[in-house]
Amino acid sequence: MTTTAAAESQPFQAEVAELLHLMVHSVYSETDIFLRELISNASDACDKLRYEAIANPGLITDGTPPEIKIVPNKAADTLSVIDTGIGMERQELIDNLGTIARSGTRSFLSKLTEAKDGANLIGQFGVGFYAAFMVADKIIVTSRRAGSDEVWVWTSEGGSGFEIAPASEEAAQRVARGTEIVLHLKKDAAKYLEAYEIERIVREYSDNIQFPILLVPEEGEPRQINSASALWQRSKSELKPEDYAQAYKQIAGAFDEPAMTLHYRAEGRQSYAVLLFAPSQKPFDLFQVERKGKVKLYVRRVFIADDAELLPAYLRFIRGVIDSEDLPLNISREMLQNNPQLAQIRKAVTSRVVSELETLGEKEPETFAKIWDAFGPVIKEGLWEDFERREKLLALSRFTTTSGENRSLKQYVDDFKPNQTEIYYLVGDSVERLKSNPKLESARARGIEVLLLTDPVDAFWTSAPIDFGGKPLKSLSQGDVDFGLIPLADDEADDKKDEPAADAATTIAVIKDALGERVSDVRASQRLTSSASCLVAGGDARDRALERLLAQQNRGEITKPILEINLRHPLVAALATDGAQAKDLSLLLFEQAQILDGEMPADPAAFASRMNQLVLRGLGK
Ligand SMILES: Nc1ncnc2c1ncn2[C@@H]1O[C@H](COP(=O)(O)OP(=O)(O)OP(=O)(O)O)[C@@H](O)[C@H]1O
């Protein structure tokens, strides 16, 4: 190592420069979070070291334990955060501290362009290392990758770039392993040099970091300022809700409060501790394509992986830790997939989480509603994917229905109308649009509740035959519906006397002839009371909403629908008697039904002209 080698300047990736500009000029008042971000990185680095040392014990033979030191220096106006973790090589310094790796930071930036007040978003997203530029106008990072004899220094003043240079001999000696981050504090950030401030922040945000955090005061001995216990190993009776809330924030890197906390220890064939949380707010990356979970796997307090798929994808919003006593410490990441012990843990914990959610839904509906509002569409993926737990997932699902919001299927079944045996639903794009869908008319006339399903995933899980407690779910836009045995609501009862105005056989024949290949069948409707027509899928065909969705993704063909007509509607009655207009009227019935389903008629211009002609005719012009 030479001390004479020149420093090399490198530009920041454009997004980093943008982010740093924001940090440097930030008016965000909660700057304390910078320390939490640096400590969290230091802790990750210690975790990584412990993990790599399992396969390569030589990395920690010098006897220095993984730990984190915080060193204020009032004379120099600097605050240092030092760890004896894994450290970074030259290229890692360039890549990790010069580009944006974390998806959170990237999505923070994309939100920034939309938001007027960017500063407040800092707290919501967390911006990692770069948060330090809120309090520092110059940062010097000196790092030695464990096992390496090179030490590199990264320096930046938060402008458009950074410098990278080999460390001086003195600096190289100081940093025997890991990373030293020296913050040259801005004038208004001098409070972070006070021991009590540092202690306060560490207690608030980082108390559960597993490695000792030592405060090295300017006078006196270094002292540990965090409790450094793996909280999940402690007994429930010792812990207060605040302890859990803090652990959640620290483990999940989150800023909200947990809506559900699940802490237990499994003993028996396998022993493991579980500490899991359901957030109360939706994170930015919930619908990312990988659908990755974030539960961390530990083995006897040693961090192993945070992508071990410990829960199924539909529970990917759950955060926390599972710490096994029995798995081998040297389990490789590749082996995690196929390990039978882990498979058992996965199964047991999944069932427990699902039951816990179900219980919360019954006992604390308001808290559960927060989880459902944020994650319902994700949980419903389980209705499609997790056959084994489908009944339980259905029981905890909540729906917007024609009777209200947040309705459970149990409530739905309890409110069945006399002779009702099925649970009815309608799939579509928006609740408003569904509410005005003619397919609801007959159900409405009987006071039958209908689930209004508007999440994209709804079209999928409902496409398999599904029942709840033996009561089948039935789409109102598919196959036959028969409400015959369910009495009409009182105020609708008079309608019943109305005889069909049109002759069924003749009318249907006329329409069939007019529509030809556009439909697979035409028939009299049981669903309609006031509208003239609607389109439904045949009994074996997919729900039309699902067909449309798949067709948009080029994953399936649209099949021909069945046109149902309301024989009591005057338009339908007119059709049978007016031979000249029969074709136009039939097409109109078809096109209207398409529009009500949110579809576009194949030839909108022809539709408009047909409509105009008929209106003009009605006006006698
Ligand atoms: N003290 C450190 N020791 C080793 N590597 C570090 C240290 N601090 C930062 N890094 C590296 O820099 C990367 C970027 O850090 P940053 O805080 O911006 O995001 P992050 O920690 O990856 O995000 P997240 O907190 O979501 O995991 C880290 O992933 C890590 O690889």
Image (cartoon, helix red, strand yellow):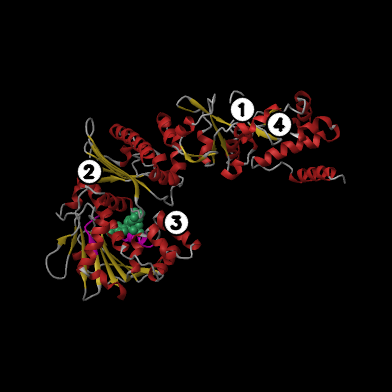
Q: Secondary structure at mark 4?
A: loop
Give the CA distance from mark 4 to mark 2.
63 Å
Q: Secondary structure at mark 2?
A: helix
Position of 582 with respect to 564 (left or right) is: right
Query: Which percent across, then down, holds residue 390?
Result: 43, 31
Which residue is labeled 4 in the image?
566
Query: Which percent across, then down, holds residue 210?
Result: 22, 51
Labels 4 & 2 near each other (Cβ < 8 A): no
Which residue is labeled 1 in the image?
479
In the rendered structure, which amino acid carries the disc numbered 1? Gly
Give the CA distance from mark 3 to mark 1.
44 Å
Residue at 53% across, 25% down: 421
Q: Neighbour class for label 4 at 10 Å: few (<14), some, many (≥20)? A: many
Which residue is labeled 2 in the image?
236
Query: Which percent across, then down, holds residue 231?
Result: 23, 48
Position of 481 with respect to 201 (left or right) is: right
Residue nearer the viewer, 592 or 464: 592
Judge depth for marks 3 and 1 and give the one in front: 1
In the rendered structure, which amino acid carries the disc numbered 3? Ser
Residue 97: in magenta span: yes
Residue at 44% across, 33% down: 394
Give the CA distance from mark 2 to mark 1.
53 Å
